[in-house]
Image (tube, grey):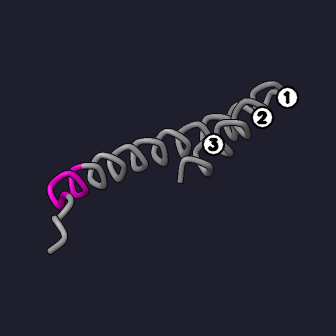
Amino acid sequence: MLGWAITFFIIAIIAAVFGFGGIAGAASGIAQILFFVFLVLLVLSLVANALRGKKPKA
C-alpha cells in the first residue's frame, strides 16, 4: 500500500512539472488517502501484535 502511495506521489510530481494541475491534484489526493490508510493499517497491525504477544512453550 505504501508503494502505491509513493507511485501516485511521483505521478503527481511529474504531472505538476509538466503543468497538468488537475491530474497532479488528483494523484496527490489519491496518494494522501493511500498513505493514511497505510498508517491506520500499520497501527492496527502493531496493536494486534502487541495484544497477542508471545505465548510461552510448554
Seen as rendered, the residue at the extreme bottom is 58
The residue shown at (72%, 36%) is 10
Marks 3 and 1, the one that precedes in the sequence: 1
Q: Secondary structure at mark 1?
A: loop
Magenta segment boundaries in residue numbering? 47-53
Most frequent secondary structure within the magenta stretch: helix
The residue shown at (43%, 48%) is 38
Is residue 45 toward the left or the right of residue 9 in the image? left
The residue shown at (69%, 41%) is 23
Q: Which residue is mark 1?
A: 18
**Please, what is the three-letter code of the amino acid marked with disc 1?**
Phe
Give the number of the disc on residue 27: 3
Residue 11 lies, in percent from the top left, at 73, 40
**Please, what is the three-letter code of the amino acid marked with disc 2?**
Ala
Where 33 falls versus 57 (above or below)?
Answer: above
Residue 25 lies, in percent from the top left, at 61, 35
* Tag 1 and tag 2, C-beta contact below 8 Å: yes
The residue shown at (36%, 48%) is 42
**Please, what is the three-letter code of the amino acid marked with disc 3?**
Ala
Give the number of the disc on residue 15: 2
Res 28 → quadrant = top right
Seen as rendered, the residue at the extreme right is 18
Seen as rendered, the residue at the extreme front is 58
